[in-house]
Amino acid sequence: MKKIFAILFLIFIFIFIAILFKPEQHDLKIVKVKSANEFYVDFNKNKKPDNDELVEMYAVRSFIKGVKTPYTSNIESAKLEYLADEFAKKQLLNKKVTLKFDGKKRLITIYLNNQDYAELLLKKGLALVNEAFKESGYKNPDMEIIKMRLKEADKLNLTAYNPYSKKLHKLDCKFANLNRNIILIPLSEIKTETKKCNYCYATKRAEKFTKYPKIEFEKYNPVYSDKFIEMYINDFTKYYYPSDKCVVTACQSLLRQINNAKSEIDFAIYGIESQPQIINALKKAKQRGVKIRWVYDLDNKTNSSYKDTLPLTKILTDSRADQTSKDAPGKFSNIIMHNKFFIFDNETLWTGSANISGTDMSGFNANTVLLIKSKDIAKIYKQEFEQMYKGYFHKKKSKLNNPEFISLQQSKVSVYFSPQDKIIENKIIPYIKNAKKYIYIPVFVITHKSLITELMLAKQRGVDVRIISDATGASNKYSPIKLIRTAGIKVKTENRAGKMHMKSILIDDKYTIIGSMNFSKSGEAYNDENVIIIENTKLTENFKRQFLYLWSAIPEKWLYKNPQAESYDSINSCFDGVDNDHDGYIDSNDKSCKYFVK
């Protein structure tokens, strides 16, 4: 009897799994074709493309504009991409299909009238085999077939067209390759008046096309400013490569303060790398008699995460590392000194989420920074700095009894430090509980359980909760993004080469939270961090506009799934010279950037 019961139980489990995940789904209609690899499938039978119905085929990949393959140049890839997209529309739109998935719930291919669509693309010379599926049995097309397709494309006289600016670009134009608004279209199909791109249609190009575009420096224009506070936000949709130049306003503001310092500079940073202008400014400040002291992080191998940190200690010798902490003399810890703040002449503070690195100071990563001109605020940070400078880091620091809600014209400012203030539990969550209209969170990491619970409760009571998450953070095995989405909270995962590195919260056009602390248990309970909460309507509204701009720049597709941080999912991440997903492989050496099999 027990054996029969066990067999029946196993059958039940098998049936349950089969229902939960069907390797094939039949008689589904394609209601919209986004590309030769991406389609909207009418799962709910409402005859329209819903945002959560976008699926992507992985077994083969159509050619991608601007991406070289073993078979094609950048321009040839662009031409074949256009042909493949048009072919997909003719073959699939409004047709009933069968979808075949693998064990990881990835769409392998589509069957149209029992015909393998992936195989059809390959036979037509409109796709190549995906590196990750090279064992699938598919074969790349013969080169002669690809040449035939290219001859067809040449007859169309394709151009890169921006329907918003009405500008025409050549297919190798660097501006066209970097602009998400560009479409490929036969010149004959454009019926409006157009302008030609000055760069690619000039008689003689002003500069050769290079992998790294010319650096353009931002004008000194804070997102918000008044007598006491300036706020800067890195717009990482404008920057495709890291740089050792002080490009963005956030960096320029720091450079100005260093150059204008008269007597003292105290600073606490995670590390420093690829910022020669900042380093040279600090050297010159010391040479003119400015007293400079600083603290920094060391990992458990006596190394800094940033290569220029330890060399700088030879120049600015008045420094302390967190490994000298009196809670573990002579030992090292995985707990980090994660602050990024500078105090100038005991009266001005520079702080935020930006590290002093080539990725953060160049605008490559999205960050938020504050410059606060207040002796009261500077004094609070000075007390925190003095503890660390004396060798007291992490839990060995004392809690500071500082005043809250310091009035700075139209702002009320409160300052908190980890781990003593238990910032998330005691300070941030009360604001979440009282939110009425919206809670917007641009963030690198969000894993704190109590915070996530309160966000879910806020969503239940009708608050508009939105999160922009970093791709690496969202793909971490500990990431709760899937759970958060299940609760109905809108989460978009950024699809840029750079990181969403902010650690901010905006609430009800009233409160802005900015700091160095990731919203995690480590950030709250162990690391050295600082957080500022500002009550200021105009400042928050300005930040909200920037948040919504970044939100709109991320395709709806990433509201339901996560792009790979280093792949063709994430714009320019396969060409930026950065190990975006921290797997030890960069750009073309990363498996996710190898769409095509030789």
Image (cartoon, rainbow, N blue to C red):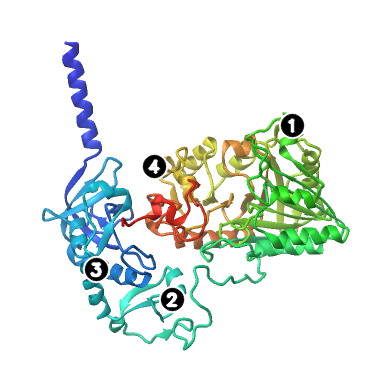
Name the residue carrying label 1: 396
Name the residue carrying label 2: 173
Mark 3 belongs to which amino acid? Ile
- Count of numbered circles in the view: 4
Q: Position of residue 388 (x, y in %)?
A: 77, 40
Specify which label sits upstream in the sequence, 4 or 1.
Answer: 1
Instruction: Using the numbered discs, state the Cα–Cα distance from disc 4 to disc 1 in whole angstroms.
Output: 40 Å
Query: Which circle, 3 or 1, is nearer the viewer?
Result: 3
Specify which label sits upstream in the sequence, 4 or 3.
Answer: 3
The label on residue 146 is 3
Specify which label sits upstream in the sequence, 3 or 1.
Answer: 3
Name the residue carrying label 4: 486
Q: Secondary structure at mark 2?
A: loop
Instruction: Using the numbered discs, state the Cα–Cα distance from disc 2 to disc 4 in whole angstroms.
Output: 42 Å
Q: Secondary structure at mark 3?
A: helix
Residue furthest to the bottom: 203
Q: In terms of image quadrants, where is residue 191?
A: bottom left
Q: Position of residue 138 (x, y in %)?
A: 22, 53
Query: Which circle, 2 or 4, is nearer the viewer?
Result: 2
Residue drawn at point x = 21 percent, y = 35 percent: 18
